[in-house]
Image: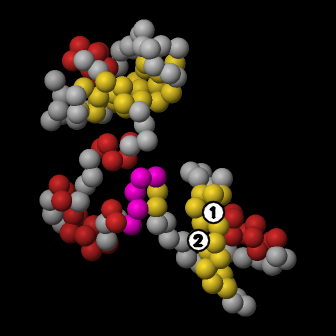
Amino acid sequence: TIHALELLSCDADSATLSATVSKGTYIRSLARDIARAVGSVGHVTMLRRVRAGPFDLRQAISLDKLNEIGKGAPLESVLLPLEAGLVDIPALNLGPEQASMVRQGRVLTGLPHDDGLYLAKTGPVPVALMEVSSGEAKVARGFNLSDVAE
């Protein structure tokens, strides 16, 4: 889905566009299709993603910083918490016994939640992504975080 498309500049040989799109949109195909629609050919010469989900350029890591990390710089100063990438997924709060079951890959039953994907947590600790269907929650992706496991 293309939510917004803005022509920022244009000359005889090139155009600069800004697009706000949904996940799965192929910008290179969009550029080709726009060129065809005006009776021309086109391709992408530069593509810069300025936002992906909850992340934007303010959270981006420069190549210099990435090089420092590769040489052993502390990761704590640059990594965001796991939950930062999951802000749009509703929480499924688990008790200690349920969290233990989920860590073993067991299915939880009798849940009063709507069908869909949930971030299972015990307190503030992420345990897994769970898919709920008809009151049953199955592990879609477990988080094997050794420093927070029970």
The magenta-colored residue range is 53-57
Label whose residue precedes the other's in the sequence (2 or 1)? 1
State which quadrant residue 138 falls in: top left
Res. 27 in view: no
Q: Residue at x 69, y 63 (%)?
A: 29
- Does 7 appear above or below 136? below
Query: Mark 2 highlights which residue?
Result: 18
- Residue 99: x and y in percent read 26, 20
Q: Residue at x 44, y 14 (%)?
A: 112
Q: Nearer the viewer, residue 28 or 5?
A: 5
- Residue 140: x and y in percent read 43, 28
Badge 1 element: strand
Q: Residue at x 50, y 21 (%)?
A: 114
Q: Amino acid at mark 2?
A: Ser
Q: Residue at x 42, y 13 (%)?
A: 111
In the picture, the quarter occupied by the C terminus is top left
Query: Mark 1 highlights which residue?
Result: 4
Residue 74 shows which numbered tag? none
Badge 2 element: strand
Please, which residue is most extreme toward the bottom here? 12
Q: Report the number of discs.
A: 2
Please, which residue is most extreme toward the right here? 39
Asked if marks 2 and 1 touch (Cβ < 8 Å), the reply is yes
Q: Residues within 10 Å of mark 1 (few under 14, many from 20)?
A: few
Q: CA distance from mark 2 to mark 1?
A: 8 Å
State which quadrant residue 64 falls in: bottom left
State which quadrant residue 137 falls in: top left
Q: Amino acid at mark 1?
A: Ala
